[in-house]
Image: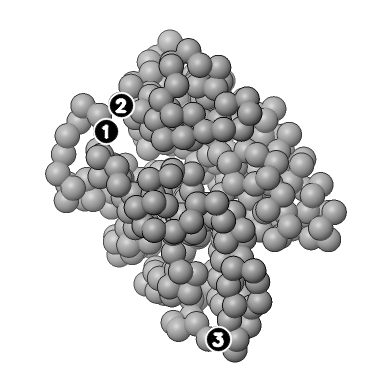
Amino acid sequence: MEFWTSFAGQFVLRGFPGAVPQNYDTLVATAVEAERLGFDGVVASEHHFEYNRFLPFPLQALGAAAAATSKIRLITGAMLLPLYDPIRAAEAAATVDILSGGRVTLGLGMGYRPMEFDGIGTAKNTRGARLSEQMEIIRLATSQERFSFQGKQYEYKDQQLSPRPLQRPIDMWFCGGTSRVGAQRAAAGGFDYWLANSDYDRTKEIVDIYLGLAREAGRPAERLRYALFRDVFVGDTLAEARDARDWFLEVYYNEHIRCYGYLMDDKGEPLFNPPFDHPAYVAFVDSLLCGTPDMVVTELKRFEQLGVHSITVPPVQLELFSNKVLPEFRK
């Protein structure tokens, strides 16, 4: 099983003000450090119109990281593809793939924040259908000399991508949360599936749905991969691990997860600024993995046995994680 980590420096943490150039220096330094520590990939995300200056263009960040590294995988997770023209997105990805020597992986999501769609001027209600078609377009454009595509959202005739990436096709994942709808879209398109932060039981449930739907759609389920965001906090004691979790909640998740419509109520409607004791937020906090190194290794081994290809962990304890956890997966 591979381990990826997110970039530090993608946004300003609450209580830790800093200039954008300094943050972006930190971003590149994270890639260098993660490569040194033995991580397999580093992940750049995307958001727009946030006061905390969240990184808006992950591929540009990966281009900078490519120049400072030599082997670590450079990953978008998630790049909000419905905010892009698919051909322009394919061109940008191909360019960075060439610059990096073929190290780009596209984690592509549909987005959920109304202000991003409103601000950029594109429809939110068609984002799921557009994402599926856009991913198929990128797959065709990066694997064939010339391609044609006829869908409900997009149409291309005898088109050619330039430049073409080193990878044919470019490595690509469908980032679909933990819903049946996301699993269904990924399965129907035959796309590898990257789940949002989930505990083991929920991960297994969605993976089983995903693989079953892939078989129903005539996709080769045995060749499909599935990955997972899994926030992990390690300490010499369980109390220390929970302290690390609580710090991250305070400086980031208490706002990021609660205030932008990421959480859903029991009717599937987005929640904006729910109270801290709301069941949806309590369930999210409970899903974060806290423990001693032995506890964390034991739990992550369950995901490895489930067939999870990679787990993405936050960048707050990289050296500790690389010293105490990674060696148990390199034997």
x and y, in percent, of residue 302 in the image:
67, 31
Q: Is the N terminus in the top left, top right, bottom left or bottom right quadrant?
A: top right
Q: Residue 251, which numbered label?
A: 2
User: Mark 1 and mark 2 in contact (Cβ < 8 Å)?
Assistant: yes
Apparent side of residue 326 relative to residue 215 in the rendered image (left or right): left
Q: Which residue is mark 3?
A: 159
Q: Residue furthest left?
A: 19
Give the class, few, some or many, for how many residues have Cα within 10 Å of label 2's Cα (few <14, many ≥20): some
Closer to us: 167 or 319: 167
Of helix, strand and loop, which one carries label 1?
Answer: loop
User: Mark 2 and mark 3 in contact (Cβ < 8 Å)?
Assistant: no
Instruction: Name the quadrant containing residue 310.
Output: top right
Which amino acid is tagged 1? Leu
Of helix, strand and loop, which one carries label 2?
Answer: helix
What residue is drawn where x is 55% and y is 22%? 280
x and y, in percent, of residue 69 in the image:
34, 59
Q: Earlier in the sequence, mark 3 or mark 2?
A: 3
Q: Earlier in the sequence, mark 1 or mark 3?
A: 1
